[in-house]
Amino acid sequence: MCVNVKRLRSDVESNAEFGAVPSVDGRGRTLLTGTDADRRAREFLCERLRDADLDVRVDAVGNVVGRWAPESADPGAAPVATGSHLDSVPDGGIFDGPLGVYAGLEAVRAMQDAGVEPGRPVEVVCFTEEEGQRFGGGLVGSAVAAGALAPEDALDIDDADGIPLGDALADIGFRGEGRLDASEWDAWVELHVEQSERLADADAVAGVVTSIVGLSRCAVEIVGEADHAGTTSMAERADALAAASEFVTAVERAAVDRREASETTVATVGKLDVAPNAPNVIPGRVSLTVDVRAVDHADIDAIIDDARSALEAVRAGRSVDATLEHTWDRPPVSMAERCRAALHDAAAAEGVPALDLHSGAGHDTMHVADVTDAALLFAPSRDGISHNPREWTEWADCAAATRVLAGALADLATE
Ligand SMILES: [Zn+2]
């Protein structure tokens, strides 16, 4: 499959101009949903899709779809789809998201150039608000496409200033109609940057994801007694933060102890609110979160059991009250065997070294995989850096991964 690296690079670099932020090291951009930078990025994408003879439509929540349906394709057949997102975190990099969108477009152009005659239409998709930096917690567009979130509810999500997503999209001319329905796709493949260093460590260029980790969140409250830091003796204290510290290290130990049995299991206490949070007051109350991820749900459950026991031990050993609430659970998602096989076959045909690995992040594919056969392909990230202007993927690696994507899409669309 003849991928044109210059064309792909030009698209990704042009897209990098929208929301570009000056950075000493690397190339940064801040592209938040519904901003002028978002409008320009979306307009440029629509133009590039049309340049390649794709029909462009925009759904109610701003998901953009370019459809390639050449004569060979049965217009009624379920399409094969690919894509990712164009929004970014503040001061993010230029590859996270845009590489998947423009590699999808380049894959279609490569198929056109190679005279591939697919039996199914091929769709290139840009999902709205993947990063969740302005509206909601992320993966908004793909949640709507997968039927996990109603379009009306998505459009009602307010930003910090009380502006709903629907108004922000209307303002930039990207509140369309209808709902992109991912369950109508025959298959989906997303190319994304790896955001870790496993490919580089294995001298591989294409990462074929086996499964996306499950994720659980717990909310923990530890209540002691706020008191004077000078006049309360050490024997009289009920220090909620000292108690929380024991709990935090116990959670870390629970995951570390499982490292041999399951290297994908990770546990993080990333947020603590300490009250009253004053230098001369013994902490009276701590609220904290526990984030647990693993490819096997049994490992997640085991960590949460350990966390409950650790909290009970802290409560019993110190004069504090403590509660743990399991607030959120998203099971692990397996990628479809036939889509993974298509990626491996394409990598072998293109001579691109491939590696099976799991994904520690959700990506839009997590939602799509709930409703159709899906796969996720990783391209290497230099030093594993992402969400940072120093995020980088070599252009040759972008091209190699796009060749694998194009081969897999051609296979899935013609089989
Ligand atoms: Zn991303």
Image (spheres, helix red, strand yellow):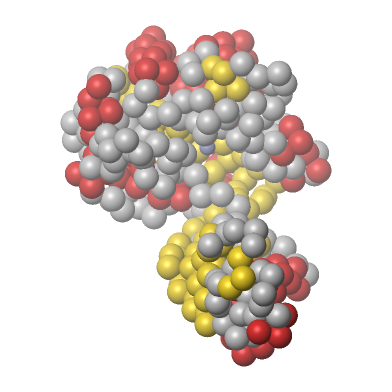
Residue drawn at point x = 23 percent, y = 47 percent: 153
Depth check: give the residue in front, 393 or 415.
393
Residue drawn at point x = 43 percent, y = 65 percent: 328
Task: Please give the count of numbered marks on the rendered protein.
Answer: 0
Depth check: give the residue in front, 129 or 12.
129
Q: Is residue 34 left or right of residue 409?
A: left
Q: Position of residue 45 (x, y in %)?
A: 40, 17
Q: Is residue 55 above or below residue 401?
A: above
Whether residue 204 is visible to the viewer of this picture, yes or no, is: no
Residue drawn at point x = 52 percent, y = 13 percent: 17
Q: Position of residue 315 (x, y in %)?
A: 59, 85
Residue drawn at point x = 74 percent, y = 32 percent: 382
Q: Is residue 30 left or right of residue 354?
A: left
Q: Is residue 393 above or below residue 284?
A: above
Q: Is residue 210 left or right of residue 330?
A: right
Q: Position of residue 21 (x, y in %)?
A: 57, 18
Q: Position of residue 131 (x, y in %)?
A: 47, 39
Q: Is residue 93 above or below residue 153?
A: above
Q: Is residue 312 left or right of residue 124?
A: right
Q: Is residue 19 above or below residue 356?
A: above
Q: Quadrant of the N terminus?
A: top right
Determine which quarter of the picture holds residue 144: top left
